[in-house]
Amino acid sequence: MSDENRAFANALNLPRFEGAGDILLKRLRLIIRDSMIEHVFYPVFPPDKNAGAVVAWLKANPVSDTSR
């Protein structure tokens, strides 16, 4: 996702830091369903374990299919 003007980051007040003269966003994971933020994983630590935590959360919180 591109956010060149930081409109999204500013609207959500996302965590950031300065590095090498640039303002950078800290790592986080957003679970978005039906255009709503349902869950936030922050901080992403340790990074090598976070994908497993996200998968576990998704399995525990499945999307219900109401179209059937």
Image (tube, helix red, strand yellow):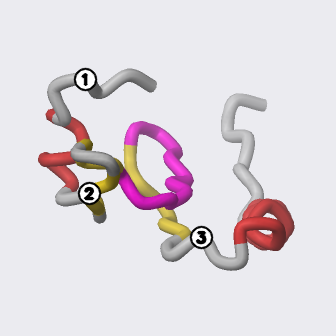
The amino acid marked with disc number 1 is Glu
Give the residue type that dot 2 points to.
Glu
Q: From which residue to which does the magenta span run?
A: 25-35
In the image, which disc is placed on residue 44?
Answer: 3
User: Which residue corresponds to mark 2?
Assistant: 18
Name the residue beneath numbered marker 1: 4
Q: Please name which of the two marks, 2 or 1, marks the residue nearer to the observer.
A: 2
As drawn, is 11 to the left or to the right of 30? Answer: left
Q: Residue 32 or 1: which is nearer the viewer?
A: 1
Earlier-in-chain disc, 2 versus 1: 1
User: Quarter of the image holding residue 17?
Assistant: bottom left
Please give the name of the residue rendered at 50% of the width and 54% of the height, measured from the top-left corner.
30
Q: Quadrant of residue 3?
A: top left
Element type at marker 3? loop
Q: Secondary structure at mark 1?
A: loop
Considering the image in quadrants, where does the C terminus appear? top right
| Image x and y of residue 48, in percent | 81, 67
**Closer mark to the observer between disc 2 and disc 3:** 2
For image coordinates 40% across by 38% down, the residue present is 35
Label 2's element? strand
Figure check: 63 above or below 49 = above
Q: Along the horizontal axis of the image, is 4 left or right of 60?
A: left
Q: Is residue 22 magenta?
A: no
Q: Amino acid at mark 3?
A: Val
Up/down of 36 relative to 55, above or below: above
Quadrant of the snapshot with the N terminus: top left
